[in-house]
Image: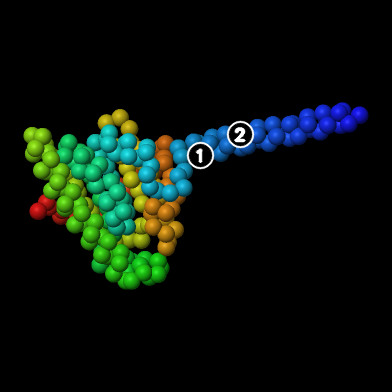
Amino acid sequence: MNWIIETVLSAVVSSVIVVGFLSAIITKMQISIELKANGIKRIYPYGRNIKSLEKKMQNCKTIKILGFSALGFTHSYSEILIEHISHGGKVEFLLAKENSEFVIEAAQMEGRDDTVIADSIKQTLDLLRATKEKALKKAQSMDSTCGTIEVRQYNTEIRNQLIICKDDKETHAWMSILIPPLAAVQCKMIEYSKSDDCIAYYDVIWERSTPREIEAN
């Protein structure tokens, strides 16, 4: 009699495990379908070390970055940017104006000194000048045409960091959902399969922003 009870219990437990496993798979598939329907390819827990982003940056013609100061991004991907520009690629940066009131307010929201973000923006501009200089020297050593870095600065409360990689056939976009006081690399990042809205968002800000000269030393 005991063996019958044990067999029945074993079958019930196995059934529960199988049902739970199948339920988890179905739920995951439903979430994936919903994301895809909304033009989202994947959500990353943190905005750093994303292989798909690095690969697209290395194999596109134009890289566009919308950020607050974008210092972390510029520092982390400086070698890729240098390589991209030295081979004739184009880079655009949209940064906040370092002297704007909302930069000071954002620093206060994040519990930091009033000048911290402004200083980060200045550091990014210095890093971009150095990047352009290194790219120019590398292009000259290869006897190739150097690409360009173009910078504009906005004066509105735009918070979400956006990265766009564009070539002749397709455009890819990643957006960080910023939640102050967390930095962009600490926030979730969305990779879009449909980038039209991201491009429109970027273009509107680009057209309204002030050009900033970035000349190699």
Answer with left or right where residue 186 lies relative to residue 64.
right
Q: Residue at x 24, y 36 (%)?
A: 61
Disc sitting over residue 191 in the figure: none
The answer to which of 100 and 174 lies nearer the viewer is 174
Q: Residue at x 40, y 69 (%)?
A: 111
Is residue 210 visible in this depiction of the protein?
no
Q: Which residue is mark 1?
A: 35
Name the residue that disc number 2 marks: 25
Quick one: label 2, few (<14), some, or many (20+) residues within 10 Å?
few
Give x and y (percent) for residue 81.
23, 43
Relative side of 156 to 34, left or right = left
- Camera sees residue 7: yes
Q: Secondary structure at mark 2?
A: helix
The one of 17 and 7 positioned closer to us in this rendering: 7
Q: Quadrant of the N terminus?
A: top right
- SS for callout 1: helix
- The image's colouring method is rainbow
172 over 161 or under it: above or below: above
